[in-house]
């Protein structure tokens, strides 16, 4: 697939996906949703991809949904948003279920759908120039893109309500203190640090990472008995992969 709104580069077992609509603040339109879904499917099915970095060009990470594009749909707005959100959510789900860890390298403001996308990362790095805002209700909309799934898990329910109801703007440091961001770095160091972390993940036990991601997705929803059963199946199942026996042998040696 030839991409128009994103770029995808793969090197040294790392796929770098870059949102590439800088003149439109990297706003999400239907085509970007489709291209993110395609990239997620391809990365998830490529055994050579052992880590993924998602970042953006320009000053913004992502301003959220392309409101002008939505407005131009006329009477087709409900169907348009149904299609677009369904495809975008498919991309988020594929990133969540792939074995490769997904690193968000947030270079600038993440708003609306961009805020949601950043929340869905397995590890979130942010430039100290980045800002985070829900912004949905400011446009008369409810959230999409996973923020109602991840945000309360990251910051707690009351703080999630505060961010979603009031559209409070968080600086990168505040987002880090609240648990939305893992680490804040200087702008010129963002991609260097993201690539260093991705290289560490790419050299690690990919199947174990994938199993870990699946377990954490149900950490708040399953009973203790169900979660422990999944843990048992996961750790014993690792002995049927290359990662488990190899990891034990390496550690003991």
Image (cartoon, rainbow, N blue to C red):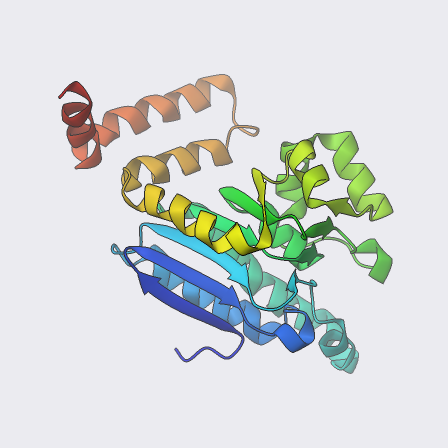
Percent coordinates x, y for residue 188 in the rendering: 54, 55
Q: Residue at x 52, y 21 (%)?
A: 223
Measuring from the top left, give residue 129's x and y in whole percent. 68, 53
Name the quarter where the C terminus is drawn: top left
Q: Is residue 78 above or below residue 13?
A: below
**Residue 172 picture quarter:** top right
The image shows residue 139, relative to residue 245, as above or below, that is: below
Indicate left or right for 4 with 146 as reference.
Answer: left
Q: Residue at x 18, y 24 (%)?
A: 248
Q: Is residue 195 left or right of residue 77?
A: left
Q: Note whether residue 94 is visible.
A: no
- Left or right, residue 130 beside residue 234: right
| Residue beneath the point at 56% across and 75% down | 31
Taking 15 as reference, is 172 left or right?
Answer: right
Q: Quadrant of the N terminus?
A: bottom left
For the point 85% across and 57% down, the residue is 138
**Residue 58: x and y, percent?**
61, 68
Looking at the picture, how far across and down is residue 109, in whole percent? Answer: 69, 57
């Amino acid at each position: 697939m030839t991409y128009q709104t994103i770029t995808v580069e793969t090197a040294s077992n790392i796929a770098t996906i870059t949102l590439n609509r800088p003149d439109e603040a990297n706003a999400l339109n239907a085509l970007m949703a489709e291209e993110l879904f395609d990239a997620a499917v391809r990365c998830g099915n490529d055994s050579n991809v052992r880590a993924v970095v998602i970042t953006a060009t320009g000053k913004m990470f992502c301003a959220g949904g392309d409101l002008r594009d939505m407005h131009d749909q006329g009477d087709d707005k409900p169907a348009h948003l149904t299609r677009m959100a369904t495809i975008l959510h498919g991309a988020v789900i594929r990133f969540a279920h792939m074995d490769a860890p997904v690193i968000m390298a947030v270079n600038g403001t993440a708003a609306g759908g961009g805020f949601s996308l950043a929340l869905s990362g397995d590890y979130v790095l942010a430039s100290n120039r980045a800002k985070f805002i829900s912004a949905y209700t400011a446009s008369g909309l409810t959230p999409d893109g996973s923020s109602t799934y991840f945000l309360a898990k990251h910051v707690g329910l009351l703080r999630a309500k505060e961010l979603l109801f009031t559209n409070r703007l968080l600086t990168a440091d505040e987002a880090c203190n609240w648990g939305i961001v893992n680490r804040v770095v200087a702008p010129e160091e963002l991609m260097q640090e993201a690539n260093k972390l991705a290289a560490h993940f790419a050299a690690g036990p990919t199947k174990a990472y994938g199993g870990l991601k699946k377990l954490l997705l149900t950490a708040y929803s399953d009973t203790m008995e169900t979660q422990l059963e999944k843990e048992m199946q996961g750790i014993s199942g690792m002995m049927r992969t290359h990662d488990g026996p190899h990891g034990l042998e390496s550690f003991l040696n």
